[in-house]
Amino acid sequence: MEEGRISYVRRSVRVLPALLIAAGVGYDIAAPLAFSGAPFLAAAPLVAAPLYSQRGTVGTGIAAIGSLLVVRLSVGGLDEVEAVTELVTVIVVSALAVAINVLVRRGGERLASARRVAEAVQRAVLPEPPERVGGLQVAARYEAAQEDASIGGDLYAVQDTPHGVRMIVGDVCGKGLGAVGTVAVVIGAFQEAAEQESTLEGVAQRLERALASASTRRDERGPREGFTTAVLAELPPGAPVVRLVNRGHPPPLLLYADGAVRPLTASDPALPLGMGGLGTWPDRADEAEFPSGATLLLYTDGLSEARDRTGRFYDPEQGLAGRANALREPAELLRTLAGQARRHSGGGMADDLALLAVRRPDVLHGK
């Protein structure tokens, strides 16, 4: 429904130049000779400049000039100074509109190029996980707060290891290239540690050391971003459980086959990764049942901190209550969540969001 309204508004705006020309001609015909519809005609190509192609803008200018000539010739010609002034004004404004259109198009091309580069970087740093990992159904989704926003620092990764399927979802403090550099450090360290470390706590400590090492290195862009909130999860083979280490991140949600939703809150809250300099605390993994047909949802605060006009935060647990059993496919679940968050915030989210859903198939149905 929201997309339909946006499409309707766009179509309505695109007919404005034609309406302005019609209004200018009608005003000139209906009004006394002392009044002129030239301002309407001059406005038409200016409105067309950011909306139409270069050819469309030129055509609008020609239509405005031609309409003024027809009206003036029909009511007395171009002998009067006012008529000549109006004609010159519309011609000059039409030429300016074409120049504006060229600038807008060049700016749009540069923006599109920058966006393509940003998307390529994002895909390189955050490769899309396969739909099946270790017998589990997996889906991931990344959405920028705005189409032209800087590259964000949200991250996710899933890896099938000798210790089970391990995954991470995190959020780097900051945006831009500094955040992307930190994302690359975290993802690279996770991929190595997930294979080598026998415990999830060991993986977390490896990430801590990797960020500590990265924070001491400087390059021409300055230091890397300071800390990263993250939640690490492990699904050991042959056991219907999930193990979690939460480093200052929103708690994952466990969606049961009957529609119930349970937040997996950390029993011992810990500081985000990269803040080891403030003190050393041993990581402790929490364990919860992860039965067949259940889905584990990990997300960044771009989801839980989406606000409506009154400042009320979106609550994913409440949004999924009673609906989780209808959203069995992980990809469908993530599409629904992202759509709910955008509608809750009126389409203008303040932060990027990363979503990761992992479903244990139903044993009885073989799904």
Image (cartoon, grey):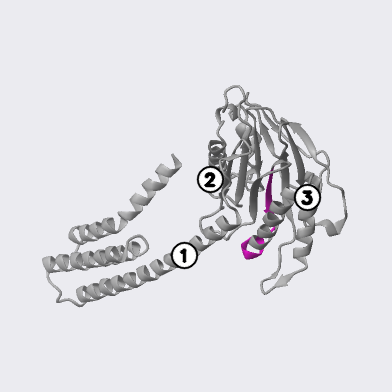
Q: What residue type is labelled 3?
A: Ala
Q: Which callout, 3 or 2, points at the residue further toward the start of the chain?
A: 3
In this picture, is 15 found above or below 255? below
Quarter of the figure with the C terminus:
top right
Q: What residue type is labelled 1?
A: Ser
Dot placed on the residue nearer the N-terminal end, 1 or 3:
1
What is the secondary structure assignment of the residue under circle 1?
A: helix
- Tell me residue 142's x, y (percent): 57, 49
First to last magenta residue range: 166-179
Say which quadrant the N terminus sits in.
top left
Q: How crowded is mark 2: few (under 14 residues within 10 Å), some or many (20 or more)?
A: some
Labelled disc at residue 204: 3
Quarter location, residue 214: bottom right
Outermost residue to the front: 162
In the rendered structure, the answer to whether residue 295 lies left or right of residue 35 reads right
Mark number displayed over residue 113: 1
